[in-house]
Image (tube, rainbow, N blue to C red):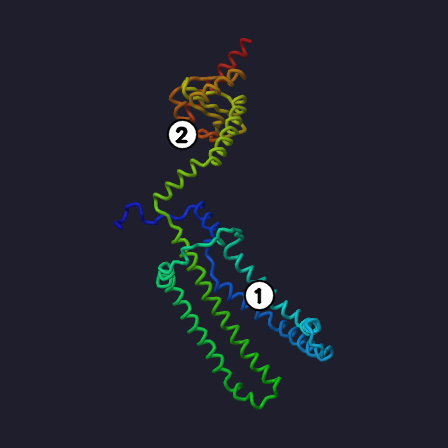
Amino acid sequence: MPPGDGNERTEEATPRKRRKSREQGMVARSTDLTGAIVLLCVLMAFPAVVSKLGNGLFASVRAGWASFNPDASPAAFAHGATIVLQPVLPGLGLLIGCALVFGLACNFGQVGFVLSGQALNPKWNRLDPVQNLKRIVGVGGIMEGLKTLVKSLVFGMVAYSVVAANWTQLMALAWLPPLAAMAVVGEIMRTMAIRVALIWLALAAIDYFYQRKRLDKELRMTKEEVKQEMKEMEQSPELKRAIAIRRRKLSRRMMQAVKSASVIVTNPTHYSVAIVYEAGKAHAPQIVAKGADHLAFRIREIATENDVPIVPNPPLARALYKHCEVGDFIPREYFQPVAEVLAYVYRTVKRIRTRT
């Protein structure tokens, strides 16, 4: 497609689209990272697991011999199996619990808490053989194949290096007692597994960042999609309701602020800007309310009810309304005209009080 035609996915995904994709189960997650961390953690806990399993197996054998029952009924068989299996359950529970806890923790660390049933909904397009073939021979399928090939080669090299380094010990196994030979083989296998897990973890970290980049690329949007989403958000009843509530709250605060304003600068009919200034308490006058048309009339009405001075000054009123927001301090370029208005108000108030 020609560049710049508006159909290119050049825009970052909006928070709304990212939220919807999470609800649909589209998240950046590496199964290799979960597998590597679980394997590494299980290997760290392996000595304790082996100890419990070994003691449990010996206890199972003793319990089996002690509770041997020639009765071949299902009830007797179930009772005997329970007695035999019970001693090894703590070791198995430790092994399974360790894998389960660290697997869940790794998944949560990658994608956070995502509870959505949409990912479980059946997608009939996955039964389409043409689509499945495209997934296999597409970029994603090729990358998965390359990852599998690289992992196989790397893991094979690691296994070969460990065996080569311990070849002398392996050749001497025939002259060792059975328990000693098992200990040597077990240590070699544990060393091999730890090295494989560490290398797998490094490869999985790279894969995780690749998955994040791939998801970001899939979620990219065209300029037209961004515009359409903004329109949908503007038409959202929830958003309109929130904006209306915010406007009402802001309007109430402004009307309260008008009662304590120092002066109201007007257009005189289209714009009204309420200014407050307390010498010694603020470094500059501050805009506490502003409005146009009906709101401007309401500001003038409240000002009249509360004896707040109203000064017509169309150029200043238009400039302050255009360039200042409620809560802003007067910009430096408007210090002089605002100071003149305040000075006029103070002189007028002083004159009225003198006459009174």
Q: Is residue 79 left or right of residue 35?
A: right
Q: Is residue 60 left or right of residue 204?
A: right
Quarter of the view holding residue 58: bottom right
At 50% from the left and 73% from the top, the residue drawn is 195
Secondary structure state at the residue bearing disc 1: helix
Q: Which mark, by number, is residue 346?
A: none
Task: Locate residue 122, reporting x and y percent.
Answer: 46, 54
From the image, tell me which residue sits under label 1: 99
Going from the N terminus, do you reach mark 1 or mark 2 first?
A: 1
Task: Locate residue 207, reporting x and y percent.
Answer: 44, 62
Q: Nearer the viewer, residue 323 or 20?
A: 20
Farthest residue, direction top: 355
Farthest residue, direction front: 73
Task: Locate residue 170, reporting x and y percent.
Answer: 53, 85
Q: Is residue 57 left or right of residue 236?
A: right
Q: Quadrant of the C terminus?
A: top right
Secondary structure state at the residue bearing disc 2: helix
Farthest residue, direction right: 66
From the image, tell me which residue sits under label 2: 323
Amino acid type, residue under disc 1 in the picture: Ala
At 34% from the left and 44% from the top, the residue drawn is 223
Badge 1, how many Cα within 10 Å: few under 14, some, many 20+? many
Q: Nearer the viewer, mark 1 or mark 2?
A: 1
Q: Is residue 216 above or below residue 237?
A: below
Q: Is residue 250 left or right of residue 6?
A: right
Task: Locate residue 144, reporting x and y percent.
Answer: 40, 65
Amino acid type, residue under disc 2 in the picture: His
- Give how far apart the Cα atoms at labels 1 and 2 are: 61 Å
